[in-house]
Image (cartoon, coloured by chain):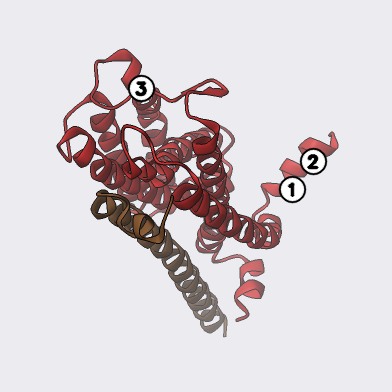
Amino acid sequence: MTSLHEFLTMGRFGVFVWPAFGFGLLVMLFNIYLAHWREKSAFREVREVHRTSEENRS
Amino acid sequence: MTQFSLFFHRLASPPHFYELSKPWGRAFSWIALVLILVGLFGGLWLAPRDFQQGNGFRIMYVHVPSAWMSLFVFMVMAASAFVGLVWRMRLAYAVAAASAPLGAAFTAVALVTGSLWGKPMWGTYWVWDARLTSELILFFLYLGFITLNRSFEDQQTGDRAAAILALVGAVDIPIVHYSVDWWQTLHQGSSFKGLTSEIAPSMLWPLLVMMTGFMFYYGWLVLWRTRSEILLRESDREWTKRVVGS
């Protein structure tokens, strides 16, 4: 890469290169969010199971 | 029992895996972040412009690692499915279930970035050639696995049904990989022949760094997601009560 202008425009390929990297980044971040959400919902579900079994016992 | 087999035997225990995977996942996340940042800098700035494709070739730094991971993750799923079906190891089913959404995501990225690369190079976003079609089938296999895995009231039935799909679907992996050799395709041939590559070293190193970064990224997320899958599968066990702090 010879200049910042070339970097930003990617020659005439910026319209293809940046959306490709942008989409890749978006999906990778979404995966992290999904893993976080899945963990939260698993915790909630496990708490619910134990709460129900405690209630049934008492 | 040797130390090695003892290690794997203990690893298969869900509570042990749950605790062990935490620090490993954290380490993987940092390694992935550093490698991907270095790979991006190398690929987007340091690597020279291609004499034929100009700067358009830089899409390779996100397309190739994603495509490679789409195949690798399905192989992990098929291997886990095999272990689950043969040895009835619950952890193996959890790994397969945790891998499927990640594999689907890698495949989607490979398809979309491939299309964005195809337009300026081939003049079209999509052609029904062997490589693209078999990769699209792989994406549907991932979706099928996810759907099948969650379609049953009984999780064990869902795990077994999805495992069979993963084993049968693994047939698509060599088809995707060798499609460019077996058929006349618009997609270019493989740039890697065994351990050697036709890519110039100045362009190759960022690609290898990105590929390694993607591997660690997958490692981090699969450990994270597997922990959640284990919790859900073992929700009635006493040890999960301690983990969630209820």
Is residue B97 left or right of B110 when viewed as pictured?
A: right
Number of other residues with Cα within 10 Å of mark 3, as a class: few under 14, some 14 to 19, many 20 or more: some
Task: Tell me the chain of label 1.
Answer: B
- The residue identified by callout 1 is B10
Chain displayed in brown: A
Residue mark closest to the camera, 1 vs 3: 3
Instruction: Please tell me which of labels 2 and 3 falls first in the chain.
Output: 2
Instruction: Please tell me which of labels 1 and 3 falls first in the chain.
Output: 1
Is any part of residue B80 visible from this angle?
no
Q: Amino acid at mark 3?
A: Gly
Q: Colour of chain B?
A: red
Q: Amino acid at mark 2?
A: Leu
Task: Tell me the chain of label 2.
Answer: B
Residue mark closest to the camera, 2 vs 3: 3
Q: Secondary structure at mark 2?
A: helix
The reply to whether dot 2 and dot 1 touch (C-beta < 8 Å) is yes
x, y (%) of residue B131?
Answer: 28, 28
Do marks 1 and 3 share a subunit? yes
Tell me the number on the disc at residue B6: 2
Q: Secondary structure at mark 1?
A: helix
x, y (%) of residue B142?
Answer: 34, 43
Name of the residue lying farthest toward the right: B2
- The residue identified by callout 3 is B189
Do marks 2 and 1 share a subunit? yes
Q: Amino acid at mark 1?
A: Arg
